[in-house]
Amino acid sequence: MVDLNKLRTFTVVAKEGSITKAAERLYRTQPAISAQLKDIEEDTKLVLFERKNSKIYLTKEGRCLFEYAQERINEIDAVVDCLRNHRQNLEGSIRLGVQFEVTTYLIPDIVHEFKKLHPKVRLEIIGLDHHDLEDGLLNNKVDVGLTVLLKQPSFFEKKAFYTFERSLVASASYLASLPPIKKYADIIDQEIIAGSSRLTDFRVWLKKNGQNQVVKQLDNVSKLVTVKERETIHSLIRKGAGMGFFDSFKLNEPSDEGEIIPVLPESKPITITVDITRRKTRTQNVLMDEFHEFLLERASNFT
């Protein structure tokens, strides 16, 4: 099997009649060009060139391969151009459902990169909590979702898009004002900042660290501030209003509001995975498939 890249190199050398000129045209070194020519001759078990002084001439077999290869390469290039034009000319609307508290910082890059590829496509970013997002996917109010939790996963196909950790932290100034926190139960009497009165992050974190007995005590928490917006939670923690969970990608952001340090640093953080999610049963749609493929291609950059 002859590598297409090497075959392209072969055709350029054949046209130029010179490795030096081919190297200049392809912005490659002469040894690299020579190595590819050698590989092609080894792969095909044919002598394709005759070398006389600094010139290169095609053999009978080389001329035959060149003419065939050039025709095939032109056909491939034409198909690629057609596909690029098709992608550039895609039109329509995509409704992307997201949980803003875990996907906010991902959205600008997704929108910017996709719109560069498909300038005529309209993107609607819909912020929902995980219950409404799942309902939106089930009822076709959302085309694709970036989800964290699914109650009915059997209805969906999903692929990990981004994984991060969430750790219990507080500002250094806030912790300095408290007696030392040495065990998990010590957090119950402190100022707690959370996304809901259910204290879901705290429950998951405590269970992950084998503290089921302390989970039961969360119902006794009295010093509590609940805020849905994670940016506000982060800001309150930085300002020393209490302890709460910080996302790993936010920990190193510059801030004038004070140093953030872990509470019980030996504890295991929560691991959160954001999935690209869509219904298993759906109407075939070229635009939606293109967007889904776009997200899948970028998943490896985040996981």
Image: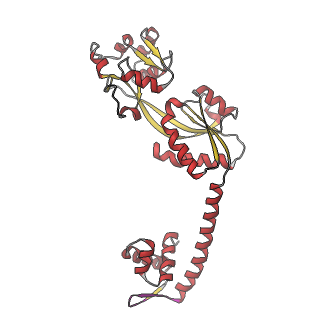
Q: Is residue 26 above or below residue 177?
A: below
Q: Give the percent coordinates (x, y) of residue 154.
A: 63, 34
Name the spot of residue 82 as percent of width and height, x first. 64, 63
Main secondary structure type of the part rendered in magenta = strand
Left or right: where 267 falls relative to 124 = left
In this rendering, position of residue 113 left or right of residue 89: left
The relative height of residue 176 versus residue 265 in the rendered view (above or below) is above
| Image position of 173 (left or right of 70) | left
Asked whether residue 62 is drawn in magenta, I would say no
Residue pictured at 50% horizontal, 88% vertical? 59
Q: Give how far across and how far down residue 271 sits, in percent.
A: 44, 32
Q: Quadrant of residue 235?
A: top left
Quarter of the image for residue 94 reads: top right
How far from the left and from the top, in percent, is residue 65? 56, 81
Q: Of residues 81 and 204, which is closer to you in this image? A: 81
**Which residue lies at the image location 28% right of the left edge and 14% below the top edge?**
177
Tell me where the magenta segment starts and ends, as one range.
Answer: 51-59
> How many labels sit on residues?
0
Identify the colour scheme used: secondary structure
Q: Which residue shows up at 54% across the image and 89% down it?
A: 60
Q: Is residue 281 left or right of residue 58?
A: right
Pick the front one: 94 or 269? 94
| Above or below, comparing residue 140 to residue 179 in the picture | below
Q: Farthest residue in the bottom direction? A: 52
Name the residue rendered at 51%, 18% in the picture.
Answer: 196
